[in-house]
Image (cartoon, rainbow, N blue to C red):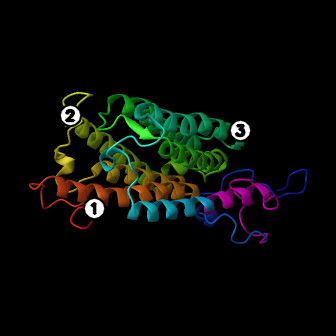
Amino acid sequence: MSSNNGTSMRQSPVPCDGDDSWTSGIPYLLFPDDPNRPPSPITNTRDNNIRLYIHFGLIVFGFLVAVAYFVGQLFQPIPYGRHTSGSGRLPVPVRIAKMVVALVPNIVFFILSYFLAGQHFNQAPNIVFFCLYVIHYLERGIVNPLVSRYSNTKIRLWIPLSWFLTGLLISYINAEFIGSAEYCNNYLYDPRFLIGLVLFIVGFALNRVADYQLVCLRESRTDTKHAIPKGPLYFLISCPNYFGEGLQWFGWAVMTWSLAGLVLWLVSEATFVPRSRQNHKWLRNQFLDYPSLRRGLIPFIF
């Protein structure tokens, strides 16, 4: 099978039990000159690798961002919420900042990238992934900022700005991949899709319930007092909201079967792991009667 310009093209997806289905998207281009390797999910050809190199370069950069986030926050928590005593320089409203950070890179830019850079955006698995991503960030960008009760209504400008730039990177590589990848036949019944989807839904539900329980700790939007988190999800860990969202993005990485999804999960965990450690330590120091059984992020372990 070949196109008019002589490049090899895949005209139909491979079976889900074929060898190509497990290498599609991972690791992209370890053997770019091998004529027997499957076409790239980004270019859909074996010979045109420029776009693939750019995509893979952004993947590597995303890994480096995850490392930088993790190391930086391991030693110094980002100064917002309970980890800051004031708004600092160049303060901006935290609700508006979180709306912009969620909606512009992860909704507007994501949708444009999906349709403009995508090559198979009208296939069933790709549409499912698109809808899941958009639903998450619509909730994150509209519902969450409106119902949350913040201890500090201002946030330093550089914090949402860094989130904004990271969001552009993450949303683009994921939109480009899920808009272009040609998944194997019957991928909606594939174990990778089914397991990943369950993890995504369970993680999303845990995250939302945990956040709602935090909202209920404060009597009104103007209440800035801290209290010991309560509720079934907080019985064993201090940050079930982080645990839930981490589980959600791990499910995303599994069901999209992509390095782009893996980068999204790693960047998320680069914040969740040190942040949960710092939150747990802060709560134990703040409340002498804080439950000794609780851990920060993983029950009985961490």
Magenta stretch holds residue 97: no
Q: In the image, which residues are magenta? A: 34-60
- Say whether residue 288 is left or right of residue 137: left
Marks 2/1: CA–CA distance: 25 Å
The residue under label 3 is 116
Marks 3/1: CA–CA distance: 40 Å
Quadrant assignment, res 207: top left
Q: Nearer the viewer, residue 218 or 123?
A: 218
In what element is the residue under mark 2? loop
The picture places residue 121, in percent across and down from the top left corner, at 65, 40
In what element is the residue under mark 3? helix
Q: Measuring 21% from the left and 65% from the top, which residue is drawn there?
A: 300
Type of amino acid at the residue the image marks with label 2: Arg
The residue under label 1 is 298
In what element is the residue under mark 1? loop
The residue under label 2 is 218
Residue 275, above or below 179: below
The mark nearer the N terminus, 3 or 1, is: 3
Q: Measuring 41% from the left and 60% from the top, which residue is drawn there?
A: 73
Answer few, some or many: residues within 10 Å of disc 2's Cα (few below 14, many 20 plus, some between 14 and 19).
some
Answer few, some or many: residues within 10 Å of disc 1's Cα (few below 14, many 20 plus, some between 14 and 19).
some
Type of amino acid at the residue the image marks with label 1: Ile
- Say whether residue 105 is left or right of residue 269: right
Please tell me whether mark 3 or mark 1 is closer to you in this view.
Answer: 1
